[in-house]
Amino acid sequence: MTLPSRTVEHGDGIAWLQRTPLDPDHAIVTSLPDASEVPELGDGWAAWFSDVVALCCRQLADDAVAIFYQTDVKRDGRWVDKGYLVQRGAEAAGSFLLWHKVVCRVTPGFITMGRPAYAHLLAFSRNLRVSPGRSTADVLPSTGAMTWSRAMGVAACEQAARFLVADTACRTVVDPFCGQGTMLAVANAHGLDAIGVERVGRRVRKARSLQLEPSG
C-alpha cells in the first residue's frame, strides 16, 4: 500500500501558484495571512486578500475545490469580515459557494476581544455541486487542537479532508500558506497527498515532519 506523499517548498506561495500548473485532482485548502502578517501591504491588504483568493480558485480545475479557513478581526473599532473578502475573490474567479460553515473558536456565549468567537470555513468550485443529501453540519462546535498559534484548527482541517475524500475526485491537497503544516498532516492522515509552500524556513522544517492521527 502506497503511503500518501508530502512535499513542502520554501518560498512564496503566490509566486508558486502563478508558475505551477495544478492537476485536475488537486484541491486548495488554506488560510490566507492577516493584515498583521503582511504589514507592507498597508491599506491595500483587503484587495490583495481577495485577489489571492481569486488566484487560488482560477488555478484549479473546474470540478476541483478551494477551501478557506479564515477568522475575522476587530480592528480599531471596525469589523473586518474575511468571509466576505473570500467570497468576493471567489466570485471574481467565477467560482460558486458550495458550503459555508461556522467554526466555534470558544464556547458559545463567551465574549472575545480582538477576534470573534468563530471562524469561517468556506468551500468553492466552478462546476462541482453538492446534493442536499450530502449535507453536513453547518456549525462545528470546536476548531479543534491548534498545533501553533496561527494554525488551522485540526477539527476544521479534518472537516475539509473528509469532504474531499467523500464528495470530490480531489486527492492532493495544496496549501500555499501552509505554516507549520497542520492541513498537510491532516490530509496525509486521511490518505491524501499534500503539497505546501511556506516562506519562513523554521516553519518549513516543522511542516515537513508534523504527524497527526485522524480522529474517530
Image: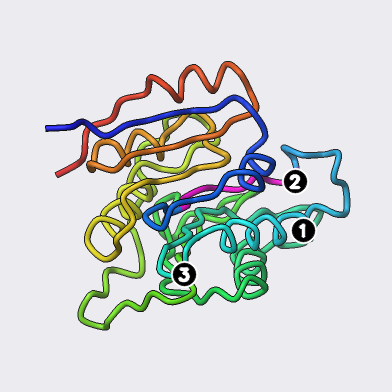
In the image, what residue occupies the spot 46% across and 70% down? 62
Residue at which label 1 appears:
46
Q: Earlier in the sequence, mark 1 or mark 2?
A: 2
Q: Nearer the viewer, residue 98 or 84?
A: 98
Q: Residues within 10 Å of mark 1 (few under 14, many from 20)?
A: some
Task: Indicate the quadrant where residue 52 lies.
Answer: bottom right
Residue type indicated by callout 3: Asp
Whether residue 200 is situated above or below residue 119 in the rendered picture: above
What is the magenta range?
Answer: 28-35
Tell me if label 1 and label 2 are in contact, CB under 8 Å.
yes
Whether residue 39 is situated above or below residue 87 in the rendered picture: above
Secondary structure beneath label 1:
helix
Q: Residues within 10 Å of mark 3 (few under 14, many from 20)?
A: some
Mark 3 or 2: in front is 3
Tell me how many marks there are: 3
- Determine which of the numbered discs, if any, sits on residue 62 in the image: 3
Q: CA distance from mark 3 to mark 2?
A: 30 Å
Whether residue 151 is situated above or below residue 79 in the rendered picture: above
- Give the quarter of the figure containing the C terminus: top left
Is 33 within the magenta?
yes
Secondary structure beneath label 3:
loop
Residue type indicated by callout 1: Ala
Q: CA distance from mark 1 to mark 2?
A: 8 Å
Residue type indicated by callout 2: Ala
Residue at which label 2 appears:
35
